[in-house]
Image (cartoon, helix red, strand yellow):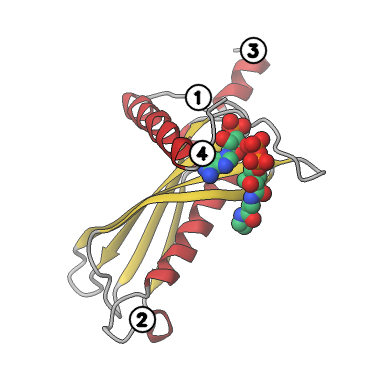
Amino acid sequence: MSDILNDALLHTTARSHVEMTHHVLPEFANSLGNVFGGQIMAWIDVCAAVAAQRHCRSVVVTASIDAVQFLLPIKLGHIVILRGQVNATFKTSMECGVSIWSEHPLTGEVRKAMKAYATFVALDDYGRPRPVPPLVLVSDEDRRRSTAAHARRAARLAAAGKEAR
Ligand SMILES: CC(C)(COP(=O)(O)OP(=O)(O)OC[C@H]1O[C@@H](n2cnc3c(N)ncnc32)[C@H](O)[C@@H]1OP(=O)(O)O)[C@@H](O)C(=O)NCCC(=O)NCCS
């Protein structure tokens, strides 16, 4: 196996996988006893940023967070699990997908509570966008996620009044 192939294999989706776990303490809850939405957004941003940085090993900034869906409330005392990964790379940007799960601390039941997509841009030492390594797609699931991410990118750039390059 050549060095080039070895290097390319380092940029699989597995390289960017992130899992974060939080216990929902009172400081994270609103008056309804659910996790405050803004708190979850902050966790999503961190989870996706770590995935993006694991992929490109550069400074990254959040360009957008979209398609946020609150599917279920997450209760005080429950355990929140965030799973993130890079879904697709473009030129200087990457789409990261984050799924958020609520685990009942006593029964162990785990239910999907949220999902979101965040786009990060890699920056060079001068704060300018810099190219990211292409994502190596290994599995059918990788290819499905990448295809869906490309479709979402076209829609989000159109909504932002920007052209895909
Ligand atoms: C994100 C940012 C770097 C883009 O800068 P820009 O001058 O628009 O740069 P470009 O037009 O060259 O675009 C760079 C990349 O950003 C992508 N991009 C720009 N706006 C975007 C948006 N709203 N959603 C998704 N991607 C976006 C472009 O598609 C391009 O990606 P590509 O190279 O893979 O095709 C700039 O807008 C910025 O610094 N924003 C503030 C970031 C920030 O403070 N985030 C919060 C804290 S981290």
Residue position marked by numbered label 1 in the rendering: 136
Q: Amino acid at mark 3?
A: Ser
Q: Nearer the viewer, residue 6 or 161?
A: 161
> Which circle's residue, 4 or 2, is located before the other in the chain?
2
Q: Amino acid at mark 1?
A: Val
Q: Residue at x 70, y 38 (%)?
A: 129
Q: Nearer the viewer, mark 4 or mark 1?
A: 4
> Which circle's residue, 2 or 1, is located before the other in the chain?
2
Residue position marked by numbered label 3 in the rendering: 2
Left or right placement of residue 68 versus residue 61 in this view: left
Q: Residue at x 47, y 37 (%)?
A: 14
> Which circle's residue, 2 or 3, is located before the other in the chain?
3
User: Alpha carbon of mark 4 to alpha carbon of mark 3: how far?
Assistant: 43 Å
> Which circle's residue, 4 or 3, is located before the other in the chain?
3
Give the numbered dot on residue 29: 2
Left or right placement of residue 80 versus residue 51 in this view: left
Give the numbered dot on residue 161: 4
Q: Residue furthest top?
A: 2
Q: Nearer the viewer, mark 3 or mark 1?
A: 1
Instruction: Report helix, strand or loop for mark 1.
Output: loop
Mark 4 nearby-residue class (10 Å; few <14, some 14–19, many ≥20): few
Q: Are marks 4 and 2 in contact (CB under 8 Å)?
A: no
Q: Residue at x 54, y 35 (%)?
A: 162
Q: Residue furthest front?
A: 161
Mark 3 nearby-residue class (10 Å; few <14, some 14–19, many ≥20): few
Q: Are marks 2 and 1 in contact (CB under 8 Å)?
A: no
